[in-house]
Image (cartoon, rainbow, N blue to C red):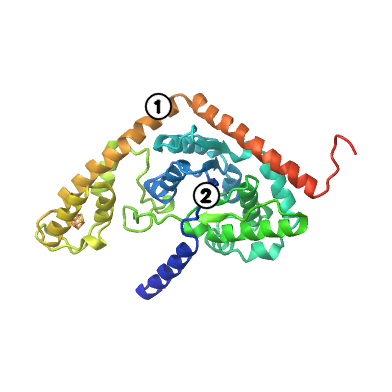
Amino acid sequence: MDKKLLSNVDKEMKIVIEKYKEPKNIKRVLSGMRPTGKLHLGNYFGALKTWLELQDRAESFFFVADWHAITTSYNNLSSLSDNTVEMMADWLAVGIDPEKSTLFVQSWVKEHAELYLLLGMTVPVRWLERNPTYKEMMENLKDRELATYGFLGYPVLQAADIIIYKADVVPVGIDQVPHLELTREIARRFNNFFGKIFPEPKPFLSEAPKLPGLDGRKMSKSYGNCIYLSDMEDEVNSKVKGMVTDPSRVRKTDPGHPEICPVFAYHNIFTDKETVLQIEKECKAGQIGCVQCKRMLAKNLNSFLEPIRSKREKLLSDKKQMVDIFIEGSRKAEYIASETISEVREAMNFLKPEGL
Ligand code: TRP
Ligand code: SF4
């Protein structure tokens, strides 16, 4: 991508971030994540860190979006339950706290499916066809049949997930903004037909610090450039050793450009300010070698990851106890979801089975 284009994208992102910046009086927060495997540092800084902040400020609901996960991988679900368990461990290990948040699994709260069905009766197909994520995924994932009913309906299910709890704020990445806009339109349409039941939720966009992958591109599982929350010390050491740096630094005495170096981007997050300034100065002056610089980073990364790692291992040593947390959360979620469903059934004039 050329520089000009990039800056236009940045500008557009700024406008979106500005538009939805820091909603006030947050009452209820909800967000979900598809269980696609172990979480990495990009997931931590892109999502979990915001969740951690929000769970202290508002009533929070976080769920494993396992139904959404199968929209794209329905042809191979052999890891679905393992991925769910791994993600539970990652959440709890970073400090998502069941005392503060309601943690649950989407497929355990069947009310989502009922609302999804009912909303589906009202949502025009053309709204879904023009969804940019839909179009993009159709183009990118050519290896499987994605023109399924379920995949087209992805945003309807997502809308159901959100409005069934009448959540007012949804912390998501910027790529999810179109889905949130659709959720608002879907809620509005329902309200127009059947009375004002649903609030229109707003996305909550955090200005997360930029954490590139090991090769300088966006950190993504499909690029194989991730540091996982579960990576062992040796793994972290060797991954950091192999990180891309400023290519102009061949010898230690070559003057460097920390601003383009992924290792430096990491230092900005994991290293104390004073040391960061010193690294910056010494890199520019050709006084610090990349090997030493990386060694410092690996050490700091490991001290960040160590408590997460050990908590994770402990959680996974008693899976039943961990899963129980999500069972309990799903009960709480279901209680609220079923109240909304009663309201919806009434508003839509379904006959109540208990009598006339
Ligand atoms: N679509 C979201 C993602 O891929 C996951 C998701 C499903 C979600 N339902 C949601 C996020 C409801 C927020 C609210 O990241
Ligand atoms: Fe990057 Fe550090 Fe090497 Fe400078 S010294 S190029 S910041 S790894």
Disc 1 marks a residue whose amino acid type is: Lys
Q: Quadrant of the N terminus?
A: bottom left
123 left or right, relative to 352: left
- Residue 314 is tagged as 1
Q: Is residue 273 above or below residue 316?
A: below
Coordinates of residue 193 in the picture (x, y in percent):
77, 58
Question: Would residue 75 be visible to someone looking at this image?
Answer: no
Coordinates of residue 224 in the picture (x, y in percent):
38, 50
- Residue 333 is tagged as none
- Residue 26 is tagged as 2
Q: Is residue 19 above or below residue 74?
A: below
Disc 2 marks a residue whose amino acid type is: Ile
Q: Secondary structure at mark 2?
A: loop
Nearer the observer, 27 or 70: 27
Mark 1 neighbour class, 10 Å CA radius: few under 14, some 14 to 19, many 20 or more: some
Residue at x 38%, y 30% (from the top left corner):
311
234 left or right, relative to 162: left
Question: Looking at the image, is mark 1 or mark 2 nearer the viewer?
Answer: 2
Q: Secondary structure at mark 1?
A: helix
Q: Is residue 168 above or below residue 335?
A: below
